[in-house]
Image (cartoon, rainbow, N blue to C red):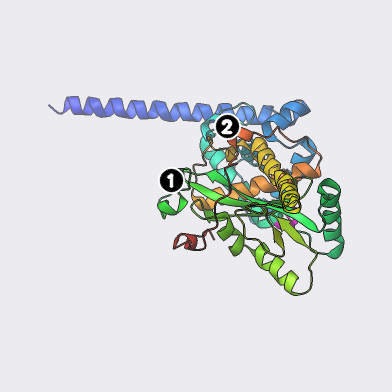
Amino acid sequence: MAFPYIQFLAVQLGEREDRRRARRNLTLVRRNLRDTQDPFSVTDIEFMRCYRLNKDACQDLIAQVEVVMINEDVIKKIPPFITVLCALSFFASGSYQRGVGYSLMNAVSQATVSRSIKIVSNIVVRHFMKNCIKFPQTNEERGQFQEMFYNATGMPNILGVIDGTHISIVKPHENEHAYMNRKGYHSINVQIVCDQTLKIIGVVARFPGSTHDAFVWRQSALAHNMKESYEAGDHDSRLIGDSGYPCLPWLLVPLRSPTTRQEINYSSTIKVAESCVERCIGVLKGKFRCLLRDRTLHYTPQCASRIIMTCAVLHNITKHYNIPDAVPLWDDIDNEPAQPIDRDEGDVGETVLK
């Protein structure tokens, strides 16, 4: 009577061995593809379509990431350039990892793609972000920024424009309610500050989606720095925001109910300047489609935060290398009316990503 059970075990073991053999064969195929395929052999247009960076920018990034991987003894089961390209491909497409991993351009497993995303985003945020995303500090730097805005809008003393945008994430296991935004999906509320050229000069990606833009601003280092500079005597440096932000000597917002011609002209000029950061957010999401609403990041809030900041760094790298911007995807941008300021955030604001 034991024979049927033994036969069942034999079948199970045989099927398991077949699956192992299939995985080994797939690994060999991928390894052969990696060894024989040169991702840099494609045309410049095709390369930028896949990775958003041009070949020079990508090679520079690979070299810098490889140095960090060597210094920190990061496990390198595949070449560093494959690690970087896998991550860039995901950031650019926003596709599910299996779709990215099985493309001939990468020829790696889904697990390798996931590992690559985490490695690259960790390295970029820890080692490159401070140099790539910088708010103007010196008088000379601030003067240059102010001149750009004055030439474009006629408004003096403006350093940049600020706004918030929501990046969709999968339902987190902890503090789920804090990440549910006003539109009914889980997100991280990301604060973006940009200059007139759409270069990002400030980003905060550590607050859950239910928090208000004004709360994110009040908790940011930039808000404290602007206040300290003003109190130290710098009365000529300002930001522009929408009506969801508080009106401060160093933060200009449109009037809620302008009546006089002067007030109407002022508010109109502010709104024209606001479009700068809206375009920046549109270009950012157009380049790195993993940030789009329908490409929900299936990661923990902490990992999603690093991915968002990495995309902001990569956006600035494309500006540095004069890579053409993608067409803004206006339908995918959170261009909802500014929220009324809520000075009582409750306990939600305590959920902050470290």
Q: Amino acid at mark 1?
A: Lys
Give neighbour class at mark 1: few <14, some 14-19, many 20+ (Cα, 10 Å). Answer: many
What residue is at 29 percent from the left and 25 percent from the top? 11
* Towards the viewer: 136 or 71: 136
How far across and how far down the image is residue 5, in percent? 19, 28
Q: On screen, 293 above or below 103?
A: below
Q: Which residues are magenta?
A: 130-134
Query: Is residue 194 toward the left or the right of residue 296 in the image?
Result: right
Q: Is residue 119 visible?
A: no
The residue under label 2 is 100
> Would residue 257 be counted in the magenta stretch?
no
Q: Furthest-front residue in view?
A: 260
Q: Secondary structure at mark 1?
A: loop
Is residue 132 found inside the magenta-colored segment of the image?
yes
Viewer-closest of 71 and 39? 39
Residue 238 drawn above or below residue 198: below
Dot 2 crowding, Cα within 10 Å, few <14, some 14–19, many 20+? many
The residue that label 1 is drawn on is 171
- Whether residue 196 is visible: yes
Q: Quadrant of the N terminus?
A: top left
Badge number at residue 159 = none
